[in-house]
Amino acid sequence: MRVIFSPEARTEFDDAVRYYDQQRQGLGDELRGEIRDFLPRLKRSPLTFPAERGDIRRLILARFPYKLLYSVETDHVYVIALAHRRRAPDYRVDRTG
């Protein structure tokens, strides 16, 4: 199963990587790596992660304060947002893809 990032989620991802690289060189790459490490599991078993609201599920990152909000479609996983868990945690749930 493929994982597709929405344009908004891609922008949030790029912004987060840039932010963490400004904090410490290479930290953005560590965020990128953590997300990359979760993707095979998300592809293999997307329904394992809990529901956030309705059909929207969440994958909480271990090291960084983010969660991937996604929906499981017929032939792919659609990532709606890379949401910071401490900043307006619910506003992205209402996005549709």
Image (tube, grey):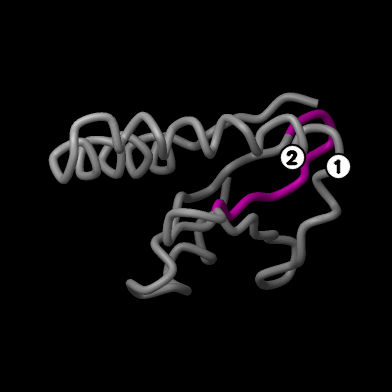
The circle drawn on residue 45 is 1
**Residue hosting label 2:** 42
Give the magenta part as a residue range: 68-76
- Residue at 81 percent of width and 26 percent of height: 1
| Residue kind at label 2, given as amino acid type | Leu
- Furthest residue toward top: 2
Label 1: how many Cα within 10 Å (few below 14, some 14–19, many 20+)? few
* CA distance for labels 1 and 2: 5 Å
Residue 21 lies in magenta, yes or no?
no
| Position in image of residue 87 (x %, y %) | 33, 72
Residue nearest the observer in this picture, 76 or 34: 34
Residue nearest the observer in this picture, 52 or 30: 30
On screen, residue 51 above or below 75: below
Secondary structure under the numbered disc 1 in the rendered image: loop
Q: Are marks 1 and 2 in contact (CB under 8 Å)?
A: yes
- Residue at 64 percent of width and 39 percent of height: 78
On screen, residue 71 above or below 21: below
Among the 4 quarters of the image, the one containing residue 57: bottom right
On screen, residue 49 above or below 87: above
